[in-house]
Image (cartoon, rainbow, N blue to C red):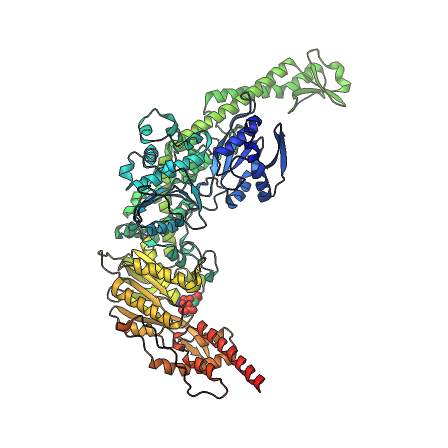
Amino acid sequence: MDPALGPPDAMAEKRDELTPMMRQYHDLCARYDDALVLFQVGDFYETFCDAAERTARLLEVTLTSREDSTGEYPMTGVPIDNAESYIEELLEAGYRVAVADQVEEPGESPGVVERAVTRVITPGTLTEDELLASDDNNFVAAVARASGEEDAGADDELAIALLDVSTGDFLATSSTSSEAISDEVSRFDPSEAVVGPDAPADLFPETCMVTPFEADVFDRKHAGGTVSRYFRNPDALLASDAEIRACGALLSYAEYVRGGEHEGERDVTAGTEEDADDAESDDPEDARLEYITHLTRYDPREYLLLDAVALRSLELFEPRAVHGREDATLVGVLDETACALGGRKLRDWIRRPLLQPDGIEARLDAVEELTGSVQCREQLHELLRDVYDLERLIGRISRERANARDLRSLRDTLAVVPDVREQLADADCDRLQQLHADLDPLADVRELIDDAIVRDPPIEITEGGIIAEEYDSDLDDLRGTARDGKQWIDDLEEHERERTGVDSLKVGYNSVHGYYIEVTNPNLEAVPEDYQRRQTLKNSERFVTPELKEREDEIVGAEERADELEYELFCEVRSDVADEVERVQNLADALATLDALVSLSTVAAQYDYCRPEILERESGEGVEIDVEGGRHPVVERTQESFVPNGARLSPEQRLAVITGPNMSGKSTYMRQVAQIVLLAQVGSFVPARSARITPVERIFTRVGASDDIAGGRSTFMVEMDELATILREADEGSLVLLDEVGRGTSTADGLAIAQAITEHLHDEVGATTLFATHHHPLTELAEDLEAAFTLHFEVEQDDGEVVFHHEIAPGAATGSYGVEVATAAGVPEPVVERSRELVAENDDDASEEGLEPRNRAGGSRSAATTDGGNQPESVPADVAAELRSLQMAHLTPVEALTELDRLQRLLEERSREESEKA
Ligand SMILES: Nc1ncnc2c1ncn2[C@@H]1O[C@H](COP(=O)(O)OP(=O)(O)OP(=O)(O)O)[C@@H](O)[C@H]1O
């Protein structure tokens, strides 16, 4: 265990003798033993002992020490004012951070000042804008099994719950397959996972912090109680015990990290179903997080499924190195949203493309309508730019972490809503009409903030200057008293000058002595009786009068009371606004949806996309994809010109074997088809002249071997693993992209595997498949298979140079042009020349060899012939034999070059041996 966590050993031994403050620190460390405790002492957050040494090193701050009667303890502190940047570094180093604040003013009660953990900051539960890396969702997940018993069977139901603490988004689903849950993990990419005793540890990638949490909160009864504090009927809302356990545990965790007076929530005996029924039971109800108002239970089968491999290879959110541009992702090209809300919504749509034509058509109708009206679209975009991140704002408000500026931001957003509504007043399609209805301007909330909070309030909420005039009569009275007093003082100078006859008399103020009357030394004789000396300066004396003192006390008293009252009033307003959390969240959702739709229509109009026709698919039937003039949405933006290509796939013609030289455009083409399908299912227009598409249920990809080298497994193993998944899980509702399968092994084995896979996909799986390959014999196979066909990219040779047209055409490619590409890449001329000779020789050989007959599929191809032939004299027999056995038609250019390189070295070795013998 990390010695920086938990109660320091040095303190534990003598806990009872520690000073009360150090004992507090010790006890909080014991209570929050999985987190680094930052302990407020005045203006600093301090850590002690091992934690101090660790933080001093990590944060590069000075290590000091603190002594009490029990000894001297290392200590390190960071200023509270910029604690967030230090906390960020601690999080990056893999720590959770528990912030223990002073929760009363020093001297407020006898003894040591009270401290409590007011928040536990973990990667998955961030709420501070400074710590949240982006506007995107930041999820914490919890996973639970149905039974929760240690010996649970393999096909027990597994559930995952996901919560974004900063926005209140809360989702849950379950499945009997752990792969399906793993796919959901990839989809939502949580930064933290809370696990109970029975969760499979290998579900989460390394980037996700795994937080073990108390077993009891995962208990069915306890979890049911927790969920029912939030949602009326958990059993009707959620589909299984596993889901209830995951949701309940996650809510308990969210309550736990909120800390503060609710820290008792870690006491897991509270919150059973019986407690929840008892309206009077205070503790659990108090712990309730007001901003969690919706729970979306979904079935993964309602959405197009994309596993981690497909998410990566289709460049949805992460760019692939090849394009080398940050925004070279699908979300990058689609995101023209105006506000953070819309950006998150769009990402969610891309993460979960739809399957049901109705839902897709509803979005497409809205996109079409907005695409057709430039003015409306642009005005909406302009208006939406003034929309703040309402979800995070209302989250902060309901967590009592919002300041007056946050309330004004909410008010400013509400002020935009009537204009946004106005733009939708004449909408035709259902979706836009519905949004028009959903856009509640929350006039009451806006009015409240307008009345209560000044236009430009300060950041601080305890120093006054927040509450508007005429909002509260007591406050107005206090302010009046302070104002009158100040006016009296303003008049005092004039008055006293007249009374004393001293023209140089001045009235001033300083923070130590308060108000004073200053008289210079030559005039001291004129000082009246009632002046009381307060301060002697070099050339003057300062006085007060009993009346001035009295007025001063009055002003200070009134100001202090006004500040306190303002704070109270502010908290009341904030709490009244917090009561409307659900309405604000609903408004946020409507604005987010509108922004996402406007963004899709902006892209559609700007980049000449077309509305796809969505076809119904009966279950068990195959897929129809008919695209004319399609373009790759990402690649077309990264280069000057792009050649459009069509695609026609149907249940009768569903497996395309695509050949063509390197760099001709095979991979681009395949990804383009998949991205067009995916875009259509998002409800977006697509980069094509026309498109007719049946929604696909799942997209599988197996792409370039060098792309996916996962830790600890060879390239070939990764490839086979991904293939195994495809063969096991794909069906006629799937779209499968295979890019150069079988490269990581010998040519013969590679071809055999590719052939077997093609046959299996064709005969058994029935998935719509695009298969790019350098194994030319596969094109022959495609001709034998009823529902397979061939496509190719042709290139031209112009004066020895290869010219790429990037145009797809029916049939198989005639040559591989690998040698020409090698020339272009700068491979030395003699090697290229020799390659040409070999290609010519081997073409003859290859034409005599065929593919394994289908009924012998899987058998390895015949071994190389080693007997002589037309052996050139200068070539040693073994090298010649190896050269002859090379099957050039079956080698990729890189493999051919590697072979050539090896043979050239062998030749040189042989010549050296010969000359040494001679
Ligand atoms: N339709 C197109 N119009 C214009 N340029 C294209 C087109 N398709 C591909 N390209 C360009 O050609 C480059 C190579 O394309 P791609 O990677 O798809 O080739 P490939 O045939 O898969 O090559 P390899 O077999 O070496 O993997 C792309 O990076 C892109 O710049």
* Of residues 101 and 914, the one drawn nearer to the viewer in this rendering: 914
Specify the farthest residue to the top.
529
Residue 358 left/right relative to 320:
left
Q: Vertically, is 149 above or below 556?
A: below
Locate the C terminus by quadrant.
Answer: bottom right
Residue visible at 52% across and 45% down?
93
Residue 827 left/right relative to 805:
right
Place residue 217 in its image quadrant. Answer: top left
* Of residues 815 and 709, the one drawn nearer to the viewer in this rendering: 709
Q: Vertically, is 455 above or below 310?
A: above
* Of residues 814 and 529, the one drawn nearer to the viewer in this rendering: 814
Q: Position of residue 840 (x, y in %)?
A: 41, 83
Q: Vertically, is 473 above or below 730?
A: above
Q: Vertically, is 351 above or below 218?
A: below
Splitting the image into four quadrants, where does ligand 1 fall? bottom left
Q: Position of residue 599 (x, y in %)?
A: 38, 51
Q: Is residue 807 visible?
A: no
Q: Position of residue 893 (x, y in %)?
A: 44, 73
